Image (cartoon, coloured by chain):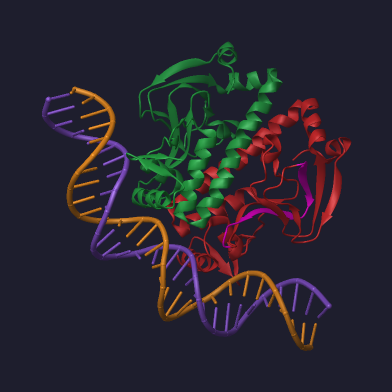
Chain colours: A green, B red, C purple, D orange
DNA sequence: TGCGTTTTATGACTTAAATCATAAAACAAG
DNA sequence: CTTGTTTTATGATTTAAGTCATAAAACGCA
């Protein structure tokens, strides 16, 4: 997260997105730096037969879509708002200028990329094992650590739908539903009127 | 890649590793920055039933293992030499000092992390589709673009064993062998005395 | 408040990749 | 050169997750 005042100093502007609107699309070249003021954004792919894969979900104060911006490569995935969202836009050239003039920003960006790479590494290893229980549980535990899941008397409320868990882990909804039930039976998580707690 | 002279100026030292030796292990805390002078290094995990997953393979002039170094987190994978290798070691504190004093290094690190994140994103989407032909071909094409595959009259020589392709894509050797044969039959790659060309 | 959509749920069936077994060719080491 | 190991190879069988069908509960919005 970069301070909003600093971004605005370099010319960033706010834009509003209704739920389910496209912010940028897979295959396009990056033109801006994006940071979420309010709302929720997912980055996703669709494969040949229309199946969705969610690369990641981003919340308030998080940025997304930087890697291709730095590499001048096409976006490998699209960005879509999951909720009504307010996004800060900063044109690439201004963003680069800001980086040059504010050395301390670089280390923040490095840490942010490192964090995301860490997540991808862990999930890649999980996804290669093919064991649904592992995959789902790793995702949930990662979510607790890095997303804004709320804790209450029942534990952490996992703020994902079964479908989202499926799209994040490469599993089908039915498999996720059955896996979550199996994990409940094993006592590692709770289902309280359809909501998942850990 | 950071200039060797600069690294040495900050106190980096060379170490030699025989083929198949461990450079650091999953679960340990990072202490150094590592850069390959000669040789080849893989980063890998083993899951509960002993199955290997290769996070990535690194060659001459490439660095590896930075994300946990920046985050102060445990390594999510181990680093093992694939060939006899010469590795440059720079202690973390010196590395951080070097970063502070050489702003231009930061942007290189950012680009490097961005590149790796890009690869992980593409492979994650591929791996979620479950179609072996897709996965194998994406890996091969990525290898051509970013690894040191040599081109000759037959095309690019894919310098991976079937087992390595399996460990990088989450497929079993037998599946990789059959998939490569299928891809050959379709004419998208060639097998010339057991070696794969594209 | 009512209606369409999304989410969760369950059972039956199919299928593609994993597993198991076995072996030949190539390579590496002594 | 011999021997042990790794790599490539192929066929038979198993199995776990995907697919398909169907539906109830919950949610959202008009």
Q: Position of residue A156 (x, y in %)?
A: 46, 35
Nearer to us in this view, C26 or B30: B30
How many labels sit on residues? 0
In this picture, residue C7 sits left or right of residue D14: left
Nearer to us in this view, A124 or B108: A124
Q: Position of residue D22 (x, y in %)?
A: 17, 52
Q: Is residue B133 magenta?
A: no
When the figure is inspected, residue A11 is found, relative to residue A31, above or below; the finding is above
In this picture, residue B48 sits left or right of residue A26: right
Q: Position of residue B10 (x, y in %)?
A: 86, 35
Q: Is residue B32 magenta?
A: yes
Residue drawn 81% across the image and 44% down it: B89
Magenta stretch in the rendered image: B31-49
The C terminus of chain B appears in which quarter of the rendering?
Answer: bottom right
When the figure is inspected, residue C18 is found, relative to residue A174, above or below; the finding is below
In this picture, residue B152 sits left or right of residue A35: right
Q: Position of residue A24 (x, y in %)?
A: 44, 30
Residue drawn 53% across the image and 51% down it: A126
The N terminus of chain B appears in which quarter of the rendering?
Answer: top right
């Amino acid at each position: 997260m970069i301070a909003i005042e600093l971004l605005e100093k370099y010319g960033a502007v706010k834009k509003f997105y209704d739920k389910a609107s496209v912010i940028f699309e897979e295959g396009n070249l990056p033109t801006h730096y994006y940071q979420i003021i309010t709302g929720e954004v997912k980055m996703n792919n669709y494969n040949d037969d229309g199946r969705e894969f969610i690369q990641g979900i981003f919340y308030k104060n998080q940025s997304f879509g930087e890697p291709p911006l730095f590499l001048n490569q096409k976006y490998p995935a699209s960005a879509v708002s999951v909720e009504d969202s307010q996004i800060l836009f900063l044109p690439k050239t201004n963003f680069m200028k800001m980086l040059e003039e504010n050395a301390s920003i670089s280390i923040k960006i490095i840490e942010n990329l490192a964090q995301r790479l860490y997540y991808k590494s862990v999930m890649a290893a999980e996804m290669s094992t093919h064991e649904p229980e592992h995959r789902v549980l790793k995702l949930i535990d990662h979510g607790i650590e890095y997303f804004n899941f709320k804790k209450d008397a029942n534990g952490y409320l996992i703020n994902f739908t079964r479908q989202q868990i499926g799209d994040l882990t490469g599993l089908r909804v039915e498999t996720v539903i059955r896996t979550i039930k199996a994990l409940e039976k094993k006592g590692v998580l709770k289902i309280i009127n359809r909501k998942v707690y850990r």
